[in-house]
Amino acid sequence: MLLEKMTMEEFSVALEKTKTLAVPYGTLEAHGKHLPLYTDTITMCRVLEEAALERDFFIAPPVHYGVCTSTGQHPGSIGITPPTLRRITTDIVTDAYARGLRNILLISGHGGGAHVAAMKESAEVLAATLPHLTIAALSIYDVIWDDLERLAETENDSHAGEMETSIILHLAPKLVKGRGAEEYPAFTKPLIFADKVSQWPGAVWGNPEKATPEKGRELFLAMVRVTIEILKKMDEAAR
Ligand SMILES: [Zn+2]
């Protein structure tokens, strides 16, 4: 159930059936020269919409801005800082709780470390503060490792690479503009430099040439399955 399309009356009736809300998180972030800036958002929103065909729960409009460190200076990326993400997460969950929602899934199509950490930090505080809240905070990429390993031909595949390109080929093929070249960032870990663009000019981590819509469909369905499992777990914990 897409919250944004419901009336207040429909919301009240539906709240009798479910007290679960999923909040998709995305980014406006460079994804190679070939994928749209809102790749993470579209992926997460579509996964939740598909999961909602099988299970009753509310879907909030996405948090469309995220914390982007590695891609923060690439063309088109517009991000927010961790305190902002923590604040908006805290406000959304607190207000949803006040409307009667009790199980809240915060799930991100972006896997950046600082981004997911900010979501989790807020969730920890909220879990300790709101007495009847069941909450989960994660990136979908945290729970899909087995499927990524099974489906990807590229060994070290990640951002805008084989599998993320495959997903967008499945979900929105018209938005895929050719293919960025195979690339891996030359980050000098553990050193951190502000200028990531010179170490990672193409913003591709992996090999987009290996992407296919079929692989994208399989990974997409795996993401849906894993999301449904998490929602079930939350419902069981809330009982
Ligand atoms: Zn992405």
Image: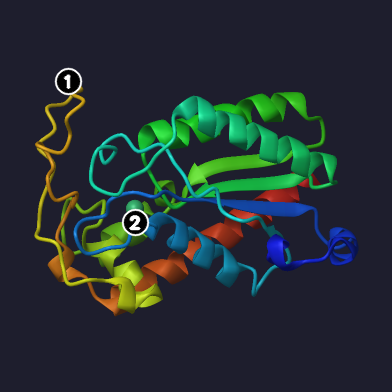
The structure residue drawn at horizontal position 53% and vertical position 35%, both measured from the top left corner, is: 119
Q: Is residue 146 toward the left or the right of residue 123 in the image?
A: left
Q: Secondary structure at mark 1?
A: loop
Q: Nearer the viewer, mark 1 or mark 2?
A: 2
Q: Is residue 51 visible?
A: yes
Marks 1/2 in contact by CB < 8 Å: the verdict is: no
Q: Quadrant of residue 148?
A: bottom left
The structure residue drawn at horizontal position 42% and vertical position 46%, both measured from the top left corner, is: 142
Q: Secondary structure at mark 2?
A: loop
Q: Is residue 34 toward the left or the right of residue 18 in the image?
A: left
- What is the crowding at mark 2: few (fewer than 14 residues within 10 Å), some, or many (at least 20)? many
Three-letter code for the amino acid on which mark 1 is drawn:
Leu
In the rendered view, would you say 77 is above or below 81? below
Three-letter code for the amino acid on which mark 2 is drawn:
Leu
Marks 1 and 2, how far apart at CA: 27 Å
Q: Quadrant of residue 149?
A: bottom left
Q: Is residue 226 toward the left or the right of residue 232 in the image?
A: left
> Which residue occupies the foreground of this view, 195 or 23?
195
The structure residue drawn at horizontal position 35% and vertical position 61%, both measured from the top left corner, is: 147
Position in image of residue 59 (x %, y %): 66, 59
Please tell me the numbered disc located at residue 165.
none
Q: Which residue is mark 1?
A: 191
Please tell me the numbered disc located at residue 37.
2
Position in image of residue 67 (x %, y %): 41, 36
> Which residue occupies the foreground of this view, 26 or 231?
26
User: Mark 2 or mark 1, which is nearer the start of the sequence?
Assistant: 2
